[in-house]
Image (tube, rainbow, N blue to C red):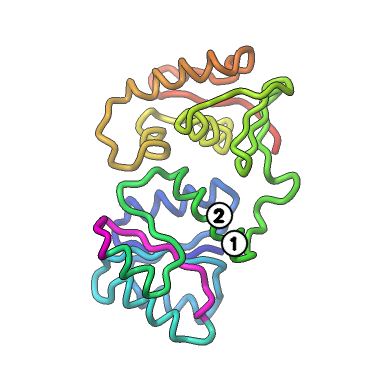
């Protein structure tokens, strides 16, 4: 279970949805009071805290967690629009394990969550078989950042890899260009949706025959058909 405290409902829903799509149980809270109430009922494996919250801010919540014997070892990622070195140092000095600055790509956030859970020993989501997304002859290994087509390695850029991973995690679902932009480039990315089309075109070319599995959904965007993990 992962808890996320974020007062922006759009960002909160995006994070919870992305975590659930990646195989995690997740709960969202808009402020600290409901978060602490939930902690008394169930201890999560990790918490994501927005720094700028109404009432009690994320750093204050973090300090409370670290001063309580029951929660002092809980892994915490701070999430904030602040990007100065002072703010980052303040968060880390207060006990945060990682720090993500807005705007962020959803796939980057998922990668940070998995990395922190591995370091803390709480990652149960990617075992021997979990570290694989497959569609036909296409295989994607998230932890190794590797893609194979018919057993042959394919070199992808970071964005191409994140794009392919996001589509595989949402197999069978027609994803709009706007959804893809939010997940891969960041939720407030100001680029044009044509960016997605260009990356899809390059991705299809690089993965060869497997590129046919990336279907164009007229009037919506793109999707990948069936696969197995």
Res 178 → quadrant = top left
The residue positioned 49% from the left and 53% from the top of the image is 112
Q: Which residues are magenta?
A: 71-86
Quadrant in which the N terminus appears: bottom right
Residue labelled with disc 1 = 119
Closer to the camera in the image, 11 or 48: 48
Q: Position of residue 110 (x, y in %)?
A: 50, 49
Pointer 1: residues within 10 angstroms few (<14), some, or many (20+)?
few
Q: Are marks 1 and 2 in contact (CB under 8 Å)?
A: yes
* Residue drawn at 43 percent across, 52 percent down: 15
Taking the image as drawn, is residue 4 in sight?
no
Q: Quadrant of residue 181?
A: top left
Which residue position is annotated with label 2?
Answer: 115
Within the magenta stretch, is there residue 74?
A: yes
Question: Between 28 and 106, which is closer to the camera in this rendering?
Answer: 106
Q: How many numbered discs?
A: 2
Please tell me whether residue 79 is drawn above or below residue 36 in the rendered image. above
For the residue labelled by badge 1, is the local secondary structure a helix, a strand or a loop?
helix
């Amino acid at each position: 279970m992962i808890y996320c405290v974020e007062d922006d409902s759009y960002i909160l829903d995006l994070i919870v949805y992305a975590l659930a799509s990646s195989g995690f149980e997740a709960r969202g809270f808009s402020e600290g009071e409901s978060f602490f109430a939930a902690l008394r009922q169930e201890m999560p494996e990790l918490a994501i805290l927005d720094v700028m919250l109404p009432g009690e801010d994320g750093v204050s919540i973090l300090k409370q967690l670290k001063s309580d014997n029951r929660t002092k070892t809980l892994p915490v990622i701070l999430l904030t629009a602040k990007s100065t070195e002072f703010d980052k140092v303040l968060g880390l000095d207060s006990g945060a394990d990682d720090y993500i600055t807005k705007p962020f790509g959803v796939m980057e956030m998922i990668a940070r969550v998995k990395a922190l859970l591995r370091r803390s020993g709480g990652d149960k989501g990617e075992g021997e078989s979990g570290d694989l997304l497959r569609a036909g002859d296409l295989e994607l290994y998230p932890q190794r950042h590797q893609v194979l087509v018919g057993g042959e390695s394919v070199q992808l850029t970071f964005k191409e890899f994140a794009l392919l991973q996001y589509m595989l995690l949402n197999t069978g679902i027609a994803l709009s260009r706007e959804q893809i932009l939010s997940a891969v480039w960041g939720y407030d990315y100001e680029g044009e949706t044509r960016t997605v089309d260009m990356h899809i075109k390059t991705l299809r070319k690089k993965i060869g025959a497997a590129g046919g599995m990336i279907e164009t959904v007229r009037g919506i965007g793109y999707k990948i058909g069936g696969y197995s993990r």
